[in-house]
Amino acid sequence: MDSDGTRDVRGTHANPVPRPAAPRENAVPPMPAVPPGAPPRPDGSAYLAWLRAPRPEAAPGVWRLGHRPRPQQEPERIPARQLLSGALIAFLVGWLVWSLLWNGYLGGWWVLPLELFTPDSWRQGNDRVGNALLWYSYYTLIALAIMFVVGRLGRWGEVWRRYGPPAWHPATPAAPPPPAPEQDPAEWPQLRRAGAHEAAERLAAEARAGLMRDVDHARISRAWHGVRTGSHSLASFTGAVLQDGSAACPHPSGERDLPARHARHDLLTGQVRLGTTADDARNPYHYRGAGLALGPELLGTSLLAVGPAGSGKTGAVIRPLAESLCLHALTGKAAVVAVGAAGAGLGPAESYDVVVRVGHPDSVYDLDLYGGTTDPDEAAAILAEALVGDLADPHAGGDSRRSTTVLAQLLGPFRAVHDRFPSVPELRQLLDGTPGPLAALRKALTDTGQEALLRELDARERQMAHPGDVGALLADRIALLDRPAFAGFFDTSGQSRPFSLKALDHPVRVRIDLPQRGHADASRILARLVLAQFTAGVTVREDRSLFACLLLDDASGVVTPEAVRGIQRLRSANAGVVLTLRTLDDAPRPLRGPLLGATGCRMALAGLTPWDGQDFAEVWGKEWTETRDVTDRQIIAETPAGKAVHMLRRVITGQAPTARAVTVRQVERERWSASELAHAVPPGHAVLSLTTVQGEHAPPLLVDLRG
């Protein structure tokens, strides 16, 4: 104790807590984690939660991210009135049985098990408390047995789940436990198994720090797939990851995401969510309430969407699909070409690598009229399809071979002389048979001694003299492109930057704006030209690992016999097209069935006409369903007492006494009738059937495109 009465505790602790030292005047403060004024680094928890979210296997078209599978068949749901009345009746029956047992109306047999399996001393001893405990325990056991039996009969468990506390506070699904390190996708176990531990550590650290996004993960996974297939070396991949981290293996544009997203995407499964499958009795039970999504495995069979203006073809179908395919292109998995009218809403120009604005003076890129080919016969076939493909006979055997021959007779000699194909004005003059250009072409061929091409030119001049020559029709059609608005386009002299669909073996994003206003016929020619070049180009690619897709908004006048045959060949080429029509009347009548048969995914939007609905109903076919026929038969009373009862019942209910007969039978009916498609599809909804490239089918589903 000190002199003042206090206790000295300085020596009571072996390791006393040191006092903080006074700050020095010249001490340097620690370096901040981020520059002054800069926002804090993002947290990677959202990305990690997305990456680790469950994605169970599901039926075609189901949004797999966070999906909770449902049974294939709908469980039987008892009506509320029947359920509650049955539960009450079961309770009353149980009460009655217990009352009869307790009051001895059913005899004493029910206490026989207690008397047989317990000693007499337990039941007849002087211990009143023990005797009471024994007997009342047995009574409780019997009562519980009665309650169990009547509870099963009265479905008390269903009443509890439907109207009890579980229904008041629905249980939220528990979060899945964190995966093991060797199974955690954020730790890149596939890289670790291959020996690239340093690269995996770099990527995992950036994921935890919030520096990686879904596009980066999909892009690096694609690059790693190239390493596994032998396209790239492990050393180059590891070096790129160690140098650039999550920015490694970039897209040629250098972009790592789109400027904005308007739809929900899951790049792990490749899906884009379009809506929600309606909770409707016409939908299979395991689809009801599930998200509806499309991916390359479905678009590889092509998609046809039909609906009137304002039904959501562009905003709810084309725009999300274009956005999804642009994201896939940034990951190196796809090439996309979106074609529509200027201002159609296909996404901002910043989302694309190439934007071709046909007829716009500020367009940076031009459109190659001949698809980048150097073969005159191939160029003639593509150009003939674009110019007069809609005039070919849609019946079996109809084609545009005459038009192809006429164009080949001119394109071959012209290229042999000028080492290029003719421009639009030059081709128009040759088709018109203008003497000057033909004479100059003949002289150049004669000077170079190309006799075979001279015979082609001679044949063309002979055909010009015959009535009904196809050249005049081709000249009229090419004149639609020889307008002042297109003077700077379709240049073949090499002075412009033409885009060719031969570039679809690279992950390129292309948007082509067609001049709809004032040039509707020219726009249809250009749309047929792009479709013909697409189907011709993607089917001859050497590397088909890249998914190629053409989105054609408003395919009016584009459906031709050759186009239908080209769409049928796309599935084996890892490519597909998405076509939209206001009505099937925009396609020739003989081609409507082949068009619906060539596309694996078919969508009928709200507002469809009954005659369009008839074509969809035929292609979707019929199914066996169970129907119930209910017949009410009036009961005739024969006795005076029965007549009096019937009269009293008629006075009370206002109806005659009847007996109900129910007949159940199996009938074959259309999945969706033409009348239902025309009048039973709510606004903002669509009926969609799906087919994967592996051949799996999904029946026609009623989908809410606004969900």
Image (tube, rainbow, N blue to C red):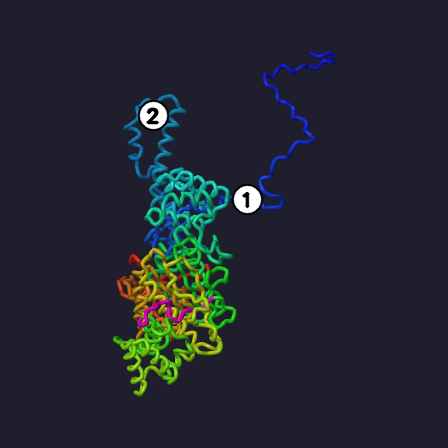
Q: What is the spatial separation of the Cα atoms under label 2 and label 1, in whole angstroms? A: 77 Å
Identified by mark 2, the residue type is: Arg
The residue that label 2 is drawn on is 123
Identified by mark 1, the residue type is: Arg
For the point 27% across and 79% down, the residue is 455
In the rendered structure, find residue 41 and report the number of the disc placed on it. 1
For the point 26% across and 63% down, the residue is 666
Q: Is residue 589 visible?
A: no
Residue 339: x and y, percent? 43, 67
- Residue placed most toward the observer, 648 or 219: 219
Residue lying furthest front: 447
Task: Determine whether the residue tagged by mark 1 lies in a helix, strand or loop.
Answer: loop
Tell which tag, 2 or 1, sits nearer the viewer: 1
In the rendered structure, find residue 467 and report the number of the disc placed on it. none
Magenta stretch prevailing secondary structure: loop
Q: Based on the displayed image, in which of its 4 quarters is residue 420 positioned?
A: bottom left
Q: Based on the displayed image, in which of its 4 quarters is residue 338 positioned?
A: bottom left
Task: Determine whether the residue tagged by mark 2 lies in a helix, strand or loop.
Answer: helix
Residue 551: x and y, percent? 40, 65
Q: Which quadrant of the rendered structure holds the N terminus?
A: top right
- Residue placed most toward the observer, 687 or 36: 36
Q: Is residue 459 above or below residue 301?
A: below
